[in-house]
Amino acid sequence: MRYISNTPAEQEKMLQEIGADKVSDLFQAIPENIKFDRSFNIPAALSELELKELIKDKAEKNLDLSEFDSYLGAGSYDHYIPAIIDHLIIRSEFYTAYTPYQAELSQGTLQAIYEYQSMICELTGMGISNASLLDGASALGEAVIMAGRHSRKEKIIMPETVHPAYREVAQTYGKPHGLKFVETSLKGSSSNYKEIKEELDGNTAAVVFQYPNFFGTVEDLAEIARMLENHKKAVFIVVANPMALGLLTPPGEFGADIVVGEGQPLGNPVNYGGPNLGFMAIRDDRRLLRQLPGRLVGKTEDIEGNTGYVMTMQTREQHIRREKATSNICTNEALNALMAAIYLATMGKKGVEEVANQCYQKTRYLKEKLAEIDDVTVVNGDNHFNEFWLKIETADKSLEEIETKMCQQGILAGVNLAELTDQQGLLVSVTEKKTREELDKYARKLEVLLNE
Amino acid sequence: MSEALIKDYGSPGRKGYSLPELDVVEKNPAESLPEGMIREEAAKLPEVSEVDVVRHYTSLSNMNYGVDSGIYPLGSCTMKYNPKINEDIARTPNLTNIHPQQKEKYVQGSLEILYELKEYLAEISGMDEVSLQPASGSHGEYVGLMIIRKYFEKKGETRTKVIVPDSAHGTNPASATMAGYNVVEIASNEGGMVDLESLKAEVDEDTAALMLTNPNTLGIFEKDICEIQKIIHDAGGLLYYDGANMNAVLGYVRPGDMEFDVIHYNLHKTFSTPHGGGGPGSGPVAVKERLAPFIPAPVLKKEGEKYYWDNDRPDSLGRVHAFYGNYGVMLRAYAYIRTAGAKGLKEITENAVLNANYMKHKLKDTYELPFASDSLHEFVLSGSRQKKEGISTVNIAKRLLDYKQYAPTIYFPLIVKEAIMVEPTETENLQSLDRFIETMKVISQEIEEEPELVRDAPHNTVVRKLDEAKAARNPDLRW
């Protein structure tokens, strides 16, 4: 194994020091009857060159996004990633470090997290952000458990407009804690507000909204905030696309208690869905803060009065509080959070706004083009950010057939909703990377195909 | 040395990015969105140039310490060298530029790698089925316990209790709570191992599982494992293996052969994927056949030469991640296992155990060794002797930083007073081990001769000892 540097002579020397004859003597505590008595059925070691060749062969069996014009989204978005991000995170002082247990030797990681927390707060309009969670869906899982504890109520109202995988994860997380989930129906591509209003009662722990929702529609958070005025105990959870917050009013301004979401759109590649990062931000409230899962970095001083950063409020966490901790989370997604922070810093005030605006404008352009085609409807109408729900109703072609034919033309036309939900149609996502030429081509090809 | 906040580099109007000109007709979003949904004021993000960003983060990186900087002997964290080729592999364009909603037929190469990784993880642990979905070790623990929960639900049994030894990682009891179980802690015996009598007294028809790390957090192999497993299984409970310490047993003993029913791995420990300053990790879960129906959906399957995600899993505990887990981490672990090969994996363990025993042997006269039992890949010392001189373990840890070496895990496991938990890993060479040993001895000497030097440490780091109490009392969590 080439990453071991002990030579046989050195091993011998060390064994002598210890007073053992051979390495296997060090394993005498393992009872003989359970010892592994053969070698692993795993291929023999590869040299670096062989490994590269092997990986190349396997990688060639993929058709990656560079082979297509892709309109896939549904929770993972292909935004442009500035070159400097990878150059900075490949600095090994960052990526080969552990959790910053020794603060004085980990100031780089700690300050970077403090800045990440600050920028997440700016973006979401919230008071406090943690240092990251595992992904957007598990962040929602943590949020509903937190809401249950905070409100001491049981009912979680979660409309069908929340990402189906997020709903599934939230239920997985929430059920062992006695939380009862009520899924309200759709009205077009929006949530059914009337139904939610009827469900809101004294036993409501939380109401969850996705912003923009799974189908791309921007929910009217002001309306929801008004509804919640008479239900102060209920926790208002918003699952936000952070990129959309370059354009949309931050959830904090609507009185959201907890904002969670997937941080991947911020400088992290799609990477087959992971590693991503979950973010969680809360209102500036001491009671909520005590319930917050995950790490927090705070600013402090050293004994000479110099500014420094430490992990703080650790009495919420598993290594101190064990079974009474607010969550079991330990490892989070620190390096991905660093990528998000570098992205937010690089794009900055203007850039995030501009990316969000371009996403909106290009999505609107494509949507308007497609809506002109016969048999095609955009369920969202004009209300969308970077994604919309396309319904294609023709008698002679199935959606699968349309998808396949578009794909043969090099276009991944969208996510087939039937694969994830009970709904029919395509969920089409457009990012700032698209050109008008590509968007025109999409519309043209679809029109020709439907008229074939 | 301190570094300004990134926002303080800024100057109004300064830009660090470029985007193509918008090439479609611009329309007013306020016309189409519900009233009041357009942000009135831009988020107060930095206004900095690319050079500002590069200088800032480079400067921050210089205030950090990674495995590439030197020894990182954090017990139970397995901070081994992270091979560079694995970073290149995890950046192979056609492996990484793939979207989680792409159809399986376009990502067969990736699925083949993941499927082979599953097979290796099953073989290494002696288990039957694997879920790659959990994104970290504690996520894996949680999934393992949810599998157990589902198993008993299906059997129509209500079991409420999970037993953990007092030497367990904090995540074990926390994960049990997350999975809706009551936690019962049992004391260790004088050898640092599970006390069989205490265990018997707690195990009953309410016991869902015992969570165990073997070797345990003292680095000591639970030699009564066969009796332990019988006690649990006879009561109808299941046995959970915390794989944090797998680096101690590769090729010597497998959790499956010890009759464990569920195990989680930490790919970022045993299989060398970098820890990123706190993540990402990856915590695959491996189970015995009878628990396979309950693992998270979807499950990666192979039919003929085709790989696919099986979503038809009626008894599954559900999803725990929006997609398939931390794929990028899995690619690195796969590359590592292929580099090691069957033989190399065993050598990893042998050298990890040899290095730890060498260090223990060299340090046990200077620092108290509270448990004399044989230990494997890590060992726990106590700073109680030094404590009598008025110097705490935390001071010793801080003094190590002055010598440009990272400190071991301290004050854990909780059963050792002033604990110093050392895990050198197999990738440290003899010179590096000797340097650490020497430094620890020097510090002990300093405590006798110049205790204030150690008490006031660190002296040479970018900041001196930080006031954690102040940070917690008046939380300043953002700019």
Image (tube, coloured by chain):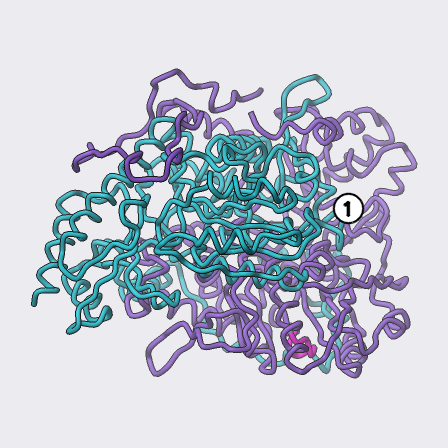
Chain colours: A cyan, B purple
Left or right: A442, with A126 as reference point = left
For mark 1, name the chain: B
Question: In the displayed structure, would residue A86 be above or below residue A349?
Answer: below
Tell me the SS state at disc 1: strand
Residue lying at 42% horizontally and 19% vertically, measured from the top left: B10
Question: In the displayed structure, would residue A327 be above or below residue A183?
Answer: above
Q: Position of residue B187 (x, y in %)?
A: 87, 62
Magenta span of residues:
B254-261
Residue lying at 26% horizontally and 37% vertically, measured from the top left: A358
Residue lying at 78% horizontally and 73% vertically, measured from the top left: B207
Left or right: A127, with B55 as reference point = right
Q: Quadrant of the N terminus of chain B?
A: top right
Left or right: B191, with A376 as reference point = right
Q: Position of residue B297 (x, y in %)?
A: 49, 70
Residue B257 on the magenta segment: yes
10 Å neighbourhood of mark 1: few (<14), some, or many (≥20)? many
Residue lying at 77% horizontally and 63% vertically, measured from the top left: B182
The part of the image, by quadrant, that contains residue B70 is: top right
Magenta stretch: helix, strand or loop mostly? loop
Comparing B437 with A375, the one in front is A375
Q: Position of residue B131 (x, y in %)?
A: 52, 69
Q: Is residue A211 visible?
A: yes
Q: Provide the residue designation for mark 1.
A: B420
Left or right: A21, with A115 as reference point = right
Q: Position of residue B402 (x, y in %)?
A: 68, 30
Q: Quadrant of the C terminus of chain B?
A: top right
Q: Amino acid at mark 1?
A: Ile
Question: In the displayed structure, would residue B232 be above or below residue B277?
Answer: below
Question: In the displayed structure, would residue B434 be above or below residue B104?
Answer: above
